[in-house]
Amino acid sequence: MFYRTRVLGLLALLGLLSSGLLMVEGQGTKPAKLVIAAVAGGESLGLKAVAPLYEKEAGIELEIVESPYPQLYEKLVTTFQAGGQTIDMAMVDDPWMPKFGTENWLEPLDALGFTRDPDIPTVVYDVGTWPPPRGPVPPSERNKQRRLYGITIVGNVELFTYRKDNSAAPRTWTDVLNTARRLNKLGYAGYVIRGLATNPIVADWLPILWSFGGDVFDNNWRCVLTSANAVRAANFLVKDLKAVAQRGPENTDAADRSRLLMTGQGHQSTIWPGEITSFTENPKVSKTIGKLAYVKMPGGPGGQPGRGMMGNWLLVIPKGSPNAKASADFIKWLISPSTQKTYVEAGGIPSRISILRDPAMAQKHVYFPALADSLASGPNWRPRTDQWNAVEASIGTNLNAALAGQQTAEQAMQKACSEINAIMKKAGY
C-alpha cells in the first residue's frame, strides 16, 4: 500500500511537471514557464531585457516568441479563435483591441486585481479598455460592460521633431510650413513626409487631420472625410507639405524618414519614439545627435490643439488561460516603478509620468518631456472599430494616390468616404 501510494504520488508530480504546473506552498499553482507572443522589433527590446530579472526573482521562465507585425496579428487571431491555450500573454497593437474585444477573446484584467495607478495617465488605461470610453461605439458593443483588457507596456504617442539648430519649436502646422519653405533646398527637405500607401501615410496624416478639426467618422459611424476641414488637411499634406518635402514622398516609409533625419537631409517631421531610440538618437548610426529636438504635435491653423496619435503596445491575457493569475502577476511586476527604470534603460518606452518627468531620465532620453506633454494633452487613437484595417487601407491608398499626383485631395476624400461607408454598412454599422 505504501509503495502504491508513493508511485501514484510520483506519477501525479510528473504530470504536473509535464504540464508546466507545480503547486508551491503559499502561492497556489505556479507555472514553470509563461509564453509571450511579441512583435519583432524595437517595441520588444525592453521586455526581452527584463525577462531574465523576472525569471530570477519569480522562478518562472519567460519564453518570448517574436513575429513580424503582420504575422503577429494573424497568429493571434488564429490562436484566439482556437481557444488561446498555447500562449499566456500577447503584445497587442492598440488598433487591434476592437477586434479582440468584440470577439471576447481576452481576460478582463480588472478581475485580476488591476486598478488605475495615478502615475499612469488615464488615456493609457482607456486605450486598453473595451468598449471604448469615448468616441463612437460599435453597434454590437453598446450594451457590453466596460472592462480593462490590456495594459500598456510601450507608451507610444506620435511626436514631432525638428532641427533646433535651424529653427524654433513650431506651435502650429502653419509654423511648420513656413519654416519648411524657408529651409527647403536641393538635397535638404524642409519637411519629411512618410507617404507610403496604407498605414504609413495614414499615421503621418491623422495628427494633421485632427489638428485641422477633422475626423474620420461622426458619432454614427458615417465617414466625414469630405468635410471642409478634412479636405483642407488633405490638401495641406499633398500640396503644401509636398512642395517642401523630399523627392518621391509617396514611396517613403518610417525607415526612410529616419535615414533622412539622422543623416541631416531633413529638417522636421512626425516621428515615433521607437524611431528616436533606434535611429535618430542612436549614436551608432545618427549624425544629428544633439541637433534634433522633440515636442508634442503642433496645433491647427484655427487654434485647434495638436493631437498626437497613440500607438501603444499592450499586454493581454487570452480568455480562459490556465495561467491567468501568474500572467497578471508578471504584468504588475513589469509596470512597477522599479522595473520600469530597468526597462527604460534597455530601450523600453514608459508611460509613467514620474519617469518621463524625471530630469535625470530626460538627460539620457531627450524625448521624454515631449512624450509626457503629449500624454497630458489628450492624444487621440484611431477609430475603435474592428473594421479599421479596411478603413485605413482605403484612406491610405487614396491619399497616397493624391500625394503621387494621380488624383486631387478632394477626389481622394470622396472616393475614400464612398468606400468606407460601404465597408461599414456591410459590417452592420
Image (cartoon, rainbow, N blue to C red):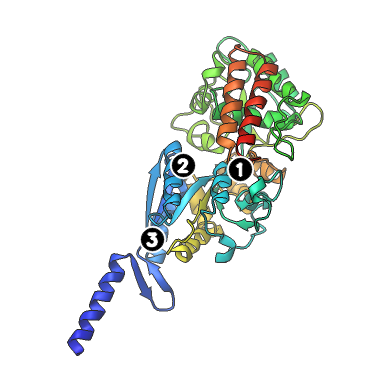
Which residue is at 38% across, 63% downward?
Answer: 60
Q: Which residue is nearer to you in this view: 313 or 295?
A: 313
Which residue position is annotated with label 2?
Answer: 73
Which residue is at 66% across, 31% downward?
Answer: 421
Q: Above or below — where is 319 with respect to 389?
A: below
Which residue position is annotated with label 1?
Answer: 368
Question: Callout 1: 10 Å neighbours few (<14), some, many (20+)?
Answer: many
Q: Which residue is nearer to you in this view: 270 or 34?
A: 34
Q: Position of residue 57 (x, y in %)?
A: 41, 65
Q: Which residue is nearer to you in this view: 252 or 285?
A: 252
Secondary element at tag 2 = helix
Is residue 19 shown left or right of residue 344?
Answer: left
What amino acid type should be assigned to the residue bearing mark 1? Phe
Which residue position is annotated with label 3?
Answer: 55
Is residue 14 shown left or right of residue 258?
Answer: left
Could you give the CA–CA distance between mark 1 and mark 2, rounded to whole angstroms? 29 Å
- Front position among marks 1 and 2: 2
Of the numbered discs 2 and 3, the one sitting upstream in the chain is: 3
Quadrant in the picture for residue 158: top right
What amino acid type should be assigned to the residue bearing mark 3? Glu
Q: Position of residue 250 (x, y in %)?
A: 55, 18
Secondary element at tag 3 = helix
Could you give the CA–CA distance between mark 2 and mark 3, rounded to whole angstroms? 27 Å
